Amino acid sequence: MEAAVAPAVRGLRAGCQRLRYGAGSERKWSLQSKQTSFRFCSTGMTLDNINKPTIDRIIRVDHAGEYGANRIYAGQMAVLGRTTVGPVIQQMWDQEKDHLKKFNELMVTFRVRPTVLLPFWNVAGFALGAGTALLGKEGAMACTVAVEESISDHYNSQIRTLMEEDPEKYKELLQIIKKFRDDELEHHDVGLDHNAELAPAYSVLKTAIQIGCKAAIFLSERI
């Protein structure tokens, strides 16, 4: 928990940071990574000329979402890590680690405080991941489908918001969110490819998880 929060509470890094994140993915078992760099000062985006409340909400909730996703995959790996599906889960988790690292950096850059609910998401995320994994690999993949679909939909909503605000000013932030959205959709498809729909009570399970995701998004944006 402390490792996830500490980078977000240190002071603003001086100057214009070069921001890197892992990018690129291939379907199913091969989720590869490469590096892409951004300089936010290339578009003149500063703390003085952004819509600070909007950016705060976006970065806070995205940090919380990626933190929760990491805990879900940690729970799944605790149960299924030594099974045949373990490498698939690990590769998706590795991408989520890259996402979380990036949002830790963005929280420092834009002076955004983390949600106070991180300790709860720590426990709830792990419990959700482990609990669905106990239903078997299909249950774990059903959880992945539900969560990643919710997150990608939310990223799409944020993309629309930033496009309406100023697509040129927020160009680099939009690129990051679009890239992470695509990664989540990739994970969603991996889940379907690994028989998520064969999980016990798939429709009920998916709906319940997505209701929880919507509640988590609502709360993490605000507190």
Image (cartoon, rainbow, N blue to C red):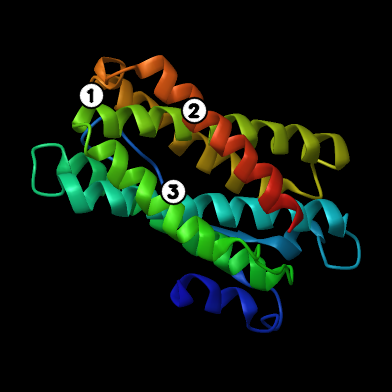
Q: Which mark is residue 69?
A: 3
Which quadrant of the figure contains the N terminus?
Answer: bottom left
Q: Amino acid at mark 1?
A: His
Label 3 environment density (alpha carbons within 10 Å; few <14, some 14–19, many ≥20): many
Q: Which residue is mark 1?
A: 194
From the viewer's perspective, is residue 10 above or below residue 180?
A: below
* Left or right of residue 78: residue 223: right
Question: Residue 168: x and y, percent?
Answer: 80, 44
Q: Nearer the viewer, residue 146 or 15?
A: 146
Looking at the rendered image, the disc whose residue lies closer to the viewer, 2 or 3, is 2
> Which residue appears at 49% of the width and 34% of the height?
182
Q: Position of residue 140 (x, y in %)?
A: 28, 34
Query: Which residue shows up at 63% across the image and 35% down it?
Result: 154
Q: Quick one: 182 or 209, which is closer to the camera?
A: 209
Q: Which residue is mark 2?
A: 208
Q: Residues within 10 Å of mark 2 (few under 14, many from 20)?
A: few
User: What kind of element bears circle 3?
Assistant: helix
